[in-house]
Image (spheres, helix red, strand yellow):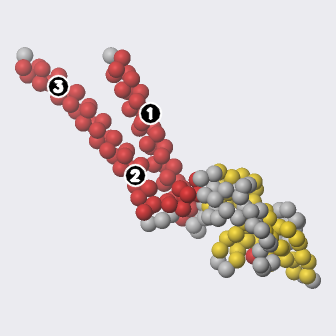
């Protein structure tokens, strides 16, 4: 009797975990596709860090949270911004603000780099400001999930749930058939 209760609890816990995992992965995919490929939550976007230029504060393979900005001319020295350079997003710290007429330029540098970036950043190329929120190592998982092989990641929770459901149904059917066989023997 005790083992049946324990098995029932384990069954419920495993089913719940698999269902939450399936819904979570599906939600991330739907939100990502709906927002044009960039996961976004309450105006914040999550970016994968691909290089060590901002270490040790922002580690390679981390996920960072950035706040999209509309006024791109109000940053000051020391702010960490995400900007577009040659179709690549870069997150670096502002070392100097240069005002040239109506234009604002930012000189930037990665915390782990020896020198400033070669080209100053036009205010129009700034995409977002780093919020200080970092989750280490999750970026490796996200980058893999966005690859061709990573697409299988979406299917794994569904397959596990399907296999577990089939196993549970098989167990229930075998318990139903066992008493019927005993009655037939009597």
Left or right: 36 as drawn, with respect to 133:
left
Q: What element carries label 1?
A: helix
> Which numbered marker is on residue 141?
none
> Which numbered marker is on residue 13?
1
Report how far apart the C-alphas of labels 3 and 2 lie in the structure.
33 Å
Residue 102 in picture, x, y percent from top left: 90, 81
Nearer-N-terminus badge (3/2): 2
Residue depicted at 77% across the width and 68% down the height: 114
Pointer 2: what residue? 156
Q: Which quadrant does the C terminus fall into?
A: top left
From this viewpoint, which residue is outermost toward the bottom? Answer: 101
Residue 131 in picture, x, y percent from top left: 76, 56
Q: Which quadrant does the N terminus fall into?
A: top left
| Front label number (2 vs 1) | 2
Nearer-N-terminus badge (2/1): 1
Residue depicted at 62% across the width and 64% down the height: 50
Q: Callout 2: few (<14), some (14-19), or many (20+) C-alpha neighbours within 10 Å? A: some
Pointer 3: what residue? 178
Badge count = 3
Residue depicted at 33% across the width and 41% down the height: 164
Q: Is mark 2 on a helix, strand or loop?
A: helix
Report how far apart the C-alphas of labels 2 and 1 lie in the structure.
18 Å
Residue 173 in picture, x, y percent from top left: 22, 33
Left or right: 43 as drawn, with respect to 3:
right
């Amino acid at each position: 009797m005790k083992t049946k209760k324990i098995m029932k609890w384990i069954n419920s816990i495993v089913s719940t975990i698999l269902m939450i995992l399936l819904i979570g992965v599906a939600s991330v995919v739907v939100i990502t596709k709906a927002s044009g490929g960039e996961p976004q939550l309450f105006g914040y976007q999550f970016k994968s860090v691909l290089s060590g230029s901002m270490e040790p504060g922002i580690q390679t393979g981390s996920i960072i949270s950035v706040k999209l900005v509309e006024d791109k001319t109000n940053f000051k020295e020391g702010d960490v911004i995400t900007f577009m350079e040659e179709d690549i997003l870069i997150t670096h710290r502002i070392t100097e603000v240069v005002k040239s007429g109506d234009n604002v330029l930012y000189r930037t540098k990665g915390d782990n780099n020896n020198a400033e970036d070669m080209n100053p950043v036009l205010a129009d190329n700034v995409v977002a400001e780093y919020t200080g929120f970092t989750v280490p190592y999750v970026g490796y998982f996200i980058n893999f999930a966005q690859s061709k092989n990573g697409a299988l990641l979406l299917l794994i929770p569904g397959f596990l749930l399907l296999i577990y459901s089939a196993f549970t149904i098989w167990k229930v059917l075998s318990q139903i058939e066992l008493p019927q066989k005993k009655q037939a023997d009597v």
